[in-house]
Image (cartoon, grey):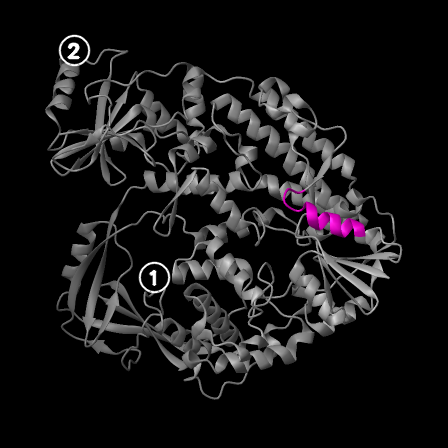
Amino acid sequence: MKLIIAEKPSVAAAYAAALGAKNKKDGYLEGNGCLVTWCIGHLVSLAEAGAYEERYKKWNYEDLPILPEVWQHVVSPGKEKQFSIVKSLMERPDVTELVNGCDAGREGELIFRLAVEMAGCTKPVWRLWISSMEDTAIREGFSHLEPGSRYEPLYHSALCRSKADWLIGINATRLFSVLYHKTLNVGRVQTPTLAMLAERDGKIMLFQKKKYYHVRLSLNGLEAVSDRVDEKEKAVSMQTACQNGQAVCVSLEREKKTVKPPKLYDLTTLQREANRLFGFTAKETLDYAQALYEKKLLTYPRTDSRYLTGDMAETVSAVARLAAGLPLFSAVGGFTPDVAAVISDKDVSDHHAIIPTLELAKQEVSLLPAGERNLFILVCCKLLCALAAPHVYETVSAVFTCGEHTFTAKGKEVVSQGWKEIERLFRSSLKEKPEDDLEDVATLPALSQGQIFDHVAATITEHFTTPPKPYTEDTLLSAMEHAGTEDMPDDVERKGLGTPATRASIIEKLVSSGFVERKGKNLIPTRNGINLVTVLPEVLTSPQLTADWENKLSLVAKGELSPETFMEGIESMAKELIARYSHISEDKQKLFAPQKESVGVCPRCGQPVFEGRSPDTPPDPPAEEQQEKDQRNSIAGRKEGVDGQDLIGGLGNGVPKAVEGALQKDKKEGEPAQRRTLAQGKFGGGRWLIWHREGLLERRFLSQAGDRRGMLPVYNICQRLAREGNGYKIFTGFLSSPQETLLC
């Protein structure tokens, strides 16, 4: 008798249904000559450090690095009962062979083999390798089982990845937590993700708004616009030259364009779009999708594929007809699904794309909970769009000359709405329209080359450059998916940071750890988050580590690199990390000290009041020269920062008298060395007052161009002064999460 072991209960149920194992038991199914059970994910995992030696239960620098000579595994907490069931089934005398039915991939191989090894089972193993959960695909897979030994290298690759994550995660987390007296979780995926957030925050903080102009011509019902003009004087000159002048259409181009239907959803694209349209977090989307999956309304959600397999052609056609019958899409007439557009066996690995199931015929969608309903309709919409006809339109570009200057007018005309009509129907049902909502189609009046327009009216419009936008879960998931991929070969199993199934939990862990906070849809690194990225070496904050590992792990999976060689490199990395960071200064140890609590609320402006320095008190000097070097190597101030000279300027209006007094005092005393001097100017849309000593500020800003990672903006040696109501807020420390002193 065969014992079939699936990765999850739902998959085991699908196997059992396809094979006729209908008798439900406690933790398994039986029938038709086979047993089917499941692992509930990782039944067995690597033991914690404390399992190796008692002293490792406490975190001490002297015990690092922790490098197990013989690795230990334990039954994962909370899964003891299921492991006992699986083990007892392996030991049954009538079980003669095992079938690894875990997910077709590296991680599935690891889950199965660790459970078998922990149980001490030595019976023959066969491997089921399928990409579809349709009954026909399951039965076909079981008729073509392969020897488990064929996948031995894949198992070693997965085990190496698991051990490497353990070694670097355990040692780096303990190292920096001990040094900075705060629990600082460091991970191969989590930390580079945080670094991307911190880098984006730094670019936003250092951004300088710049004004620019466009000159616009009104031409009998159409508008032609100049290129960007940076100087107002030039814009005024163009306007003067064109006003009441003659414009000539010197070129007219028409081009027919086709927009192919979108691909189906994988988990990441579903999470991104649900965040953009509904504001769902990645975790919320995964939870809703999982609930729909358990209700048999959606296919398996934890997938990284956007295609279906060839055996699903008939099924997807039937599902599409059901989806087209939903009230929202009933206005779409004559819908003929193009099933071939979503079929690609080579692009399906572990699981196919997310689509609705035939259970839709039995389900009243309106009765689903709101979150599940919205997500389900979104998936139905994507399926219909993917199967619909292309969107076809014609662009028109007209170029005009006037007063020896060039202007352009652009428009487009829809030839065939195609799949865009389905998308329009869906978006029209949304209460809140997304920022990227479909634009109205702009059309141009009939034009001809050489056409002349007399007495044109010319106007100037004023615009400002905008800083980079903070990451949302939508844009962060995309960044994680593509991070480091250019350095990975095409055949690696996992690309980017994390997997579709783990990215949501990574974001949630950053938030729960206090390194990131949500502000609306935006994800903003906290003071502690920026500090953590600042103090860690680049090898831990860059996606390059993941790229390097995946390159080597792909070689292990092919049998071209020994697991021992790979692990030797990881152990060397851990040893080097511990040796490099043996101690830090006392000042640095205070980086993660808790911020002061509010002492009350200002009666004039209603803002919290904190204890702090007055503006005429200089900050403490750096403890040592090394501090300055470390700060300059911060993630926050990269090459995109501003020139320090832009900060130097005269005082504007509204500066507190205490600050004016300090300035006058310094001026009278000639601003001698070792004394504070105060520079002030516009910076990042605000007004900055900056304390510095002996030209320290200038050195930091001017040295950044030659410093590969840049410098720490002078957040910890400066004070930002911003007018707020009838009082002044003084910002100190990292501006992403400032300590505030309110002076009224």
Q: Secondary structure at mark 2?
A: loop
> Do we see residue 157 in this rendering?
yes
Residue 34: numbered disc: none
The residue at which mark 1 appears reads as 435
* Most foreground residue, 214 or 727: 727
Is residue 85 inside the magenta stretch?
A: yes
Residue 712 drawn above or below residue 258: above
Q: Which residue is mark 2?
A: 669
- Splitting the image into 4 quarters, where does residue 431 fall? bottom left
Q: Residue furthest bottom?
A: 334
52, 413: nearer the viewer? 52
Mark 2 crowd level (few <14, some 14–19, many ≥20, 10 Å Cα): few
Q: Is residue 304 left or right of residue 426?
A: right
Please give left or right for residue 256 compared with residue 188 in the image. left
Q: Position of residue 184 (x, y in %)?
A: 50, 31
User: Over which residues does the magenta segment extend?
Assistant: 76-88
